[in-house]
């Protein structure tokens, strides 16, 4: 055998070996794929609402850890996370990636209503069910143009009309407020909807709205606006925004001498809020939520103990609702008896009397659960359970 033939022979052997190895590797990957079912997490891992996505990811992972002790249909559930960067456009891109590239059978998230609404076009077109832990705007599950339910979108939280009603009643009856000022994040469907429902119900309770001001996400200086609000002499300031801006608003309101009660919605729920606002500034502030870690149910005690052991801190509402969302998806896959997205969606739509750490879930015709609300009061930087309000 001459030198040229030897070289060709070695090259041929190398190609054959590489092909064989690639075949073995491919087989391993196919086997791994056959043993897992992928669940997507379209979450706010960075950006202005990163606290929400990180908590949600923790909740989902904790749920999957529990689920995978037994498995579903003889398989393990695997979480694949795409960072939506707390933005609606990025949420659409993340949804596309999870469905087209990662081949997930269901998606949990986003948490921000605007992001869910934007991304819903993608999962609807692909016929892949998506469930948001905390998207509370009514348009998350209903197309406002047609009034029809979005067939592939669900939520585990209550909706803004109820949340606005709850805080309006609390402000009027418990805090004895008669004059309210409202600061609205005009870049957020969540904030605009919640402000509207609070205003309508506060007026029904006999109160008056003496000032309405607006801001945009990522604004940092609210002093001029707060000076105008202070001049209107309100009993309460309602700020249905997200924690990053809310923290600065509360801080600057106190610095401006605005000592009245300040209230908001579940977008306040973040361990970062006291760091931004300052613990003392948060005294006499309240927000509505779906969940309190102080709930004394056996199910919640088990969940909070497991969460604290795993993550060295108490769970917030985003962790709890994401945990329940993961359990709901797993139950739907099990009920469907298949990883087929159409069958999973059909099983989700028929969910009835599911009991989670944040309460029971029976989806109505608009894919919304009917749930209770809690009012959380901030005291020296710590969240304390104030009261529970049933629908």
Image: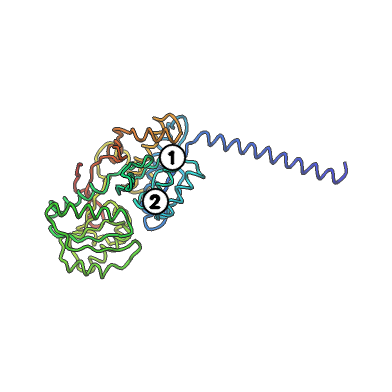
Q: Quadrant of residue 23?
A: top right
Which element type, helix, strand or loop, lies under badge 2? helix
Q: Position of residue 297 (x, y in %)?
A: 25, 38
Q: Is residue 23 left or right of residue 50?
A: right
**Of the numbered discs in the image, which one, if any, rests on residue 127?**
1
Q: Position of residue 332 (x, y in %)?
A: 38, 33
Crowd tier of the residue under label 2, counting other residues whose Cα lies within 10 Å: few below 14, some 14–19, many 20 or above: some
**35 and 207: which one is in front?**
207
In primary-sequence order, the first of circles 1 and 2 is: 2
* Above or below 251: residue 299: above
Q: Is residue 244 left or right of residue 336?
A: left
User: Residue 121, can we see it?
Assistant: yes
* Above or below 150: residue 272: below
Question: CB atoms at circles 1 and 2 under 8 Å apart?
Answer: no
* Above or below 58: residue 179: below
**188 and 325: which one is in front?**
188
Q: Quadrant of residue 274?
A: bottom left
Tell me, what colour scheme is on the image? rainbow
Q: Quadrant of the N terminus?
A: top right
Q: Is residue 320 left or right of residue 21?
A: left
Which element type, helix, strand or loop, lies under badge 1? loop
The residue sitting at 21% across, 49% down in the picture is 375
Dot 2 corresponds to which residue? 118
3D distance between C-alphas at marks 1 and 2: 15 Å
The residue sitting at 35% across, 41% down in the picture is 154
Q: Quadrant of the C terminus?
A: top left
**Of the numbered discs in the image, which one, if any, rests on residue 14?**
none
User: Residue 304, can we see it?
Assistant: no
């Amino acid at each position: 055998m001459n030198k040229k033939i030897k070289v060709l022979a070695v090259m041929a052997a190398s190609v054959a070996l590489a092909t064989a190895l690639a075949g073995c590797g491919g087989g391993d990957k196919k086997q791994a794929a056959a043993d897992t079912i992928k669940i997507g997490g379209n979450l706010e891992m960075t950006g202005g609402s990163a606290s929400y996505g990180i908590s949600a990811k923790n909740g989902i992972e904790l749920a999957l850890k529990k689920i995978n002790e037994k498995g579903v249909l003889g398989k393990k559930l695997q979480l694949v996370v795409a960072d939506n960067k707390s933005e609606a456009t990025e949420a659409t891109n993340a949804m596309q990636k999870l469905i087209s590239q990662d081949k997930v059978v269901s998606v949990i998230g986003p948490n921000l209503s605007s992001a869910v609404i934007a991304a819903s076009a993608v999962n609807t077109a692909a016929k892949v069910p998506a469930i948001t832990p905390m998207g509370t705007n009514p348009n998350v599950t209903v197309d406002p143009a047609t009034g029809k339910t979005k067939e592939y979108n669900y939520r585990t939280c209550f909706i803004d009309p109820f949340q606005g009603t709850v805080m309006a009643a609390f402000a009027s009856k418990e805090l004895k407020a008669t004059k309210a000022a409202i600061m609205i994040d005009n870049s957020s469907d969540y904030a605009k909807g919640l402000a509207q429902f609070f205003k309508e119900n506060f007026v029904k309770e006999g109160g008056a709205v003496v000032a309405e001001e607006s801001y945009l996400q990522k604004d940092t200086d609210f002093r001029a606006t707060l000076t105008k609000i202070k001049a209107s002499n309100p009993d309460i300031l309602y700020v249905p925004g997200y924690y990053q801006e809310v923290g600065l608003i509360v801080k600057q309101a106190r610095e401006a001498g605005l000592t009245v009660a300040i209230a908001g919605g579940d977008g306040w729920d973040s361990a970062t809020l006291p760091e931004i606002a300052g613990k003392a500034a948060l005294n006499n502030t309240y927000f509505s939520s779906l969940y309190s870690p102080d709930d004394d149910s056996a199910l919640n005690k088990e969940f909070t103990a497991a969460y604290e052991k795993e993550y060295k801190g108490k769970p917030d509402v985003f962790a709890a609702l994401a945990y329940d969302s993961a359990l709901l998806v797993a139950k739907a896959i099990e009920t469907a008896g298949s990883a087929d997205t159409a069958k999973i969606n059909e099983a989700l739509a028929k969910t009835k009397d599911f009991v989670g750490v944040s309460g029971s879930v029976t989806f109505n015709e608009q894919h919304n659960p009917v749930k209770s609300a809690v009012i959380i009061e901030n005291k020296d930087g710590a969240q304390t359970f104030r009261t529970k309000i049933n629908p």
